[in-house]
Structure formats: C-alpha cells, structure tokens
Amino acid sequence: MPFRSSSQLSAFVVLLIINLLSAAVAQARDPLWEELPWDERLGVSWFERRGAQGDLAAQLRAAQMHEQGIGTARNPAEAARWYARAAEQGHPLALFKTARAWQTGALGRIDLARAAAFYRAAADAGIGLASFNLAVMLESGAGLQADRQQAAALYEQAWRQGLAKAALSLGILRLTGGDSDPIAAYAWMAAAAKAGVPGAATQRDRLAALLGPTAVADAAAVPLPALGGK
C-alpha cells in the first residue's frame, strides 16, 4: 500500500517496531506467566516503590513476599523492615510482626522492651497471640519486671480474643505462686480441654485426681468468659 506522506510512513514504522518488540517479549516470557498471580507479575520491587510512598497495603504485601519468598528469595530481615513501616501506620498484624522482630533480633538486634511495647499495641488492637506473648514475658520476667497479675489478665484477654491455648497457660499460672487458686486452675484447664488444646485434658485430669470430686464440682460452677467472647 503506497504512503501518501512521510508522516504515514513514520507511523507505520513505529507500529511495526512495537509489534516486533511485543512478539519478542512474548517469546521470551515464561509460558506460565499468564497463570501467575498478579502480584508476582508486578514483582516485589513494585510494592516496595509504592510502600516507600506510604501505601500501607503495598508495605504489607512487600513484607509478606519477602517473608514467604513470593517472587523473590526469602529475606526475614527485609520482611521485618517492611512490617515495621506498616506498624508505623498502626496496622495490627504489622504491630505483632514488628514485636516478634524485636524479640528475635530480625531488625538487627534483640530489644525486649520494644518487643513488649509493640505486643501491647497489637494486643490492644485485638491480636490474641500478642496478648499471649506479652503475658508470657510478664510471667517469666523476660525483658520486663515479672507481674503475675498482669500476666493472668493478658492470658484471659487472649482467651477472650479467641486464643484457646491461653486457658491452659492461665490454669497452670493459677496453680503456682503465693496467689494460687486450684479451683480456678481446674476451671481454666477444663475450658482449655473442651476447646481441644493439646495436653489440656491430661493436666485437667491430673489436677482432678488431687482435688477430689467435691472441689471438681465447685470448679465446674466457676463462670468463665466464652472463648472469643467480649
């Protein structure tokens, strides 16, 4: 087909080059590329660029991709850094992940005081495992002054937030120390066993053998909050 002007010829050449480049990319592309999830097609660097601009969702996705090795090599330290960025915006999961990073040293060093502060924020945001981990720190005095009362309150909070294993830990806590209460301990162990917590039924039955049927009946009458209830 004849070209009426040089501009038509130029447009045709540009279109031809674009088609050739597109064909070359298609031939070089992994044949399964079309089946990849969209975030893997974009690549972690895309989410990092968006995250650097303050995009919370992108910060979280970049952290997850580094954490799980999605579209990039697993990099726990880089994942921790992106979770920390998201934690600055108050995201509950990011607060919890940042607490774990300070507790394990994934952010370069171990800082239990910072870990406790982030666990507290995550617990207040409704993360049951954050309440539980902070309770463990307070019960053992790991990086904090030991406080059995606060630990007990946090174990119960974790139970109310849906974490069943907190009931067993609370039951064991109630068996020890100067403020021990075997009746309450049995009630919490029984609640943990009913929720299917591994080992809880064994602990409950051992305590029942020591308490006797009258005390067990008393324990059964102790009112406890529902798992995951307010």
Image (cartoon, grey):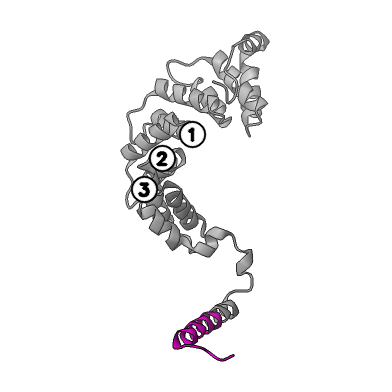
Residue 95's disc number: 2
Residue range of the region highlighted in magenta in the rendering: 1-20
Q: Quadrant of residue 151?
A: top left
Horizontal and vertical percent position of residue 75: 44, 59
Is residue 186 positioned above or below 137 on the image?
A: above
The residue under label 1 is 127
For the question of whether residue 106 can be seen, the reply is no
| Residue lying at 60% horizontally and 69% vertically, measured from the top left | 33
Q: Pick the residue in front: 149 or 185.
A: 149
Camera-near label (3 vs 2) is 3
Q: Secondary structure at mark 1?
A: loop
Give whichever of discs 1 and 2 has the lower sequence position.
Answer: 2
The amino acid on which the numbered mark 1 sits, given as a three-letter code, is: Ile
Please report contact status of discs 1 and 2: CB closer than 8 Å, yes or no.
Answer: yes
Q: Main secondary structure of the magenta part?
A: helix
Q: Nearer the viewer, residue 21 or 158?
A: 21
> Which residue is under mark 3?
85
